[in-house]
Amino acid sequence: MARTLTRWKVEDYHRMIANGLLAGRSVELIDGQIVDMAPELPIHRATYRRGSKYLEKLLGSRAVVFSAAPITLPSDGEPEPDISIVKAPESQYDQRHPSPNDVYWLIEVSNSTLAFDLSTKAETYAKDGIQDYWVIDVKGKQLWVHRVPNNGKYEAVSQLRTGIIKPLSMPDISVEINRLF
């Protein structure tokens, strides 16, 4: 007999949260599956906090920078990227999480989850049309930049160690790569 996993909708996931079924658990919804999140080491937290503060200062009122906060995806997903750069004003997210139409770009910080962030997370974000997805590889001291989503894959993936990068949505902004580490 073949067994299949239950595919959860975002609405189901929200009901579980509201009813306390996921209280005390560090999970996220990825492609209809409730997935345990990796424990956070101090270097992980420090890296995304530094990156968030830098981007908040750099972007000012042009965007909202969320740290470790959910976004809602049409593919039955509610992942929690380490850094989300989304459209202002922040008040529009009082009753909902940002969706792909709100996202300028997403950043994951990888200390122990690099393979997952470069595969499953990248596929998820590409499938839902996230145009600019970056992965900070803490151990490798490099930034993986994913662009041009097409059929659940990114057609352009590059690795950068130094220099600047310009977000697709804000080509007039220069992000210093070393400031993200």
Image (cartoon, helix red, strand yellow):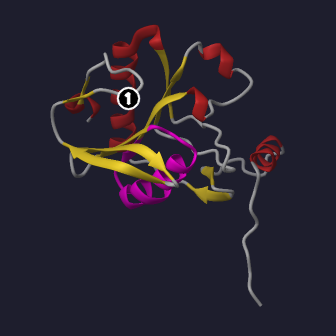
Residue 25 location (% of width, % of height): 64, 51
Quadrant of the image containing the C terminus: top left
Residue 24 colored in magenta in the image: no
User: Taking 125 as reference, is 162 left or right?
Assistant: left
Q: Is residue 108 visible?
A: yes
Give the residue displayed 45% in from the left and 52% down from the top.
122
Element type at mark 1: loop
Residue 178 location (% of width, % of height): 20, 32
* Residue 29 or residue 27, whichever sits in front: 29
Toward the bottom, the furthest residue is 1
* Residue 71 or residue 167, whichever sits in front: 167
Up the image or down, 1 lies above or below 113; here it is below
Residue 179 location (% of width, % of height): 24, 28
Give the residue displayed 50% in from the left and 48% down from the top.
126
* Residue 56 or residue 144, whichever sits in front: 144
Residue 117 colored in magenta in the image: yes
Residue under circle 1? 168
User: Taking 170 as reference, is 123 left or right?
Assistant: right
Tell me where residue 37 sits by quadrant.
Answer: bottom right
Give the number of marks: 1
Give the residue displayed 35% in from the left and 35% down from the top.
46
- Three-letter amino acid code at the position of disc 1: Leu
Residue extent of the magenta highlight: 108-131
User: Taking 44 as reference, is 91 left or right?
Assistant: right
Toward the left, the furthest residue is 162
Tell me where residue 108 sits by quadrant.
Answer: top left
